[in-house]
Image (tube, rainbow, N blue to C red):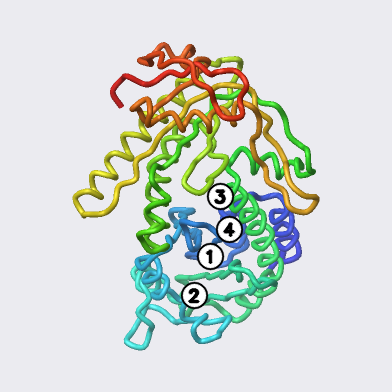
Amino acid sequence: MNGLADLIAWIIAQGLAADDIDALLEGLSLRLTEQGFPLLRASIAMPSIDPKHRGLSVAWYRDTGISKEAQEHGEEGEALFRRSPISYLLQNQLEFMRWSLPANAETPPFPVLKDLSDLGATDFVIKITPFPGDTALAGASFSIATDQQGGFTESQLAGVEGVMPALALACCRIAMTRVAKDVLAVYTGERTSELILTGQIQRGDGASIYAAILFADLKDFTSLNEKHEPHDIVDWLNEHFDAIGKPVVEEGGEILKFMGDSLLAIFPVQAADTAQACRLALSAAQRALATNDALNQGRRERGEPELLVDIVLHLGEIFYGNVGTDRRLDFTVIGRAVNEASRMEKLADALETNLLASAQFAAQTGRAFRAAGHFKLRGVEEPAEIYAWTGAV
């Protein structure tokens, strides 16, 4: 293969610069075909460290270009994986395999081989390269297919083998960066993960932010712990946090913390538009209550316990940053406004409402809140003026 050194140099440069596998695979495939390599399809697949997806595969087709597929966790995703060449290699402790096409009675019944046979493929080659370290990001697979009569020649395969170390290294770098971003975002939120990755990692790093605050608390959760198995409780908790958390994220908020049966989120004030931040927080709260009610309706029909939720909306200045020991930090939010929001939730039952707001928040929305009175909050010197929601959820 001509230009092997140039191709390796390009792969290394792309591995340092690329944010995803798509550009790497597409550029490599186009460069191979430009050099006369008879490529019909190429694919890169890697496992994910992600709560929703078990793996990611990207394929390039000569006629249609790039396609991407994320395999989900669960029985369906596992069944699809078992019907793949990658699973076959792993089960048989192999790192390389080659199948002549079109498929025949002796060819394993993998859907990808049948699909390639239908496209006129004559040869399929796959190689797995392990990554170092004992993590779920175990390695990457690279596969190629051709419709050249007689399949790939040995010299063609030798040329591809020559770029494999550089390709594996590029895949590893891109994957490690993606995992760092994804895992941080899962555990800390999108905004926080970006701050951490830009270097705000020292204890005390952070900033004061003016934001609308949403505090949600699931009621009677303690009694459930005494009556039901832990795995059932975890499943129910996740369902209700989904019902509450998805509207928060979709309305532009960021979930900062899950604290047992509670959720804390903020809607930072952007461009001095305080009213807009409060409108988004209120919309998220209304949607969360409606979704949680629908979830409880299904629980009643199945004879399962319900989990009601109280939501408090507040507005104020908070400190958003690193708190903890010198080696174990938590990127969190602290401040008087946060304390007040958590204390206000205790008033929900007495006021017979599941949506409360502070006077500061209610003044920004112009919506159906009624003044409920002034109340002493534990640990807060001045009585707080509290508003209760009177509109329909």
Nearest to N terminus: mark 1 or mark 4: 4
**In this rendering, the label closer to the viewer, 1 or 4:** 1
Mark closer to the chain start, 2 or 1: 1
Residue 71 figure quarter? bottom left
Q: Which mark is residue 176?
A: none
Q: Earlier in the sequence, mark 4 or mark 2?
A: 4
Q: Residue at x 33, y 40 (%)?
A: 292
Tally of numbered tags: 4
Q: Is residue 325 visible?
A: yes
Q: Secondary structure at mark 1?
A: strand
Q: Which residue is mark 1?
A: 45
Q: Secondary structure at mark 3?
A: helix
In this rendering, the answer to whether 362 lies above or below 121 is above
| Residue hosting label 2 | 86
First reached walking from the N terminus: tag 3 or tag 2: 2
Question: Crowdedness of circle 4 by 10 Å Cα count: few (<14), some, many (20+)?
Answer: many
The location of residue 268, given as percent across then percent down, is: 58, 26
Location of residue 226 in the rendering, given as x and y in whole percent from the top left corner: 39, 58
Image disc number at residue 186: 3
- Foreground residue, 129 or 148? 129
Q: Residue at x 41, y 39 (%)?
A: 244
Looking at this view, name the residue that lies furthest to the left: 301
Along the line of sight, the residue nearer the viewer: 223 or 263: 223
Residue at image position (62%, 56%) is 179
- Three-letter code, disc 3: Val
Which-is-in-front pick, marks 3 and 4?
Answer: 3
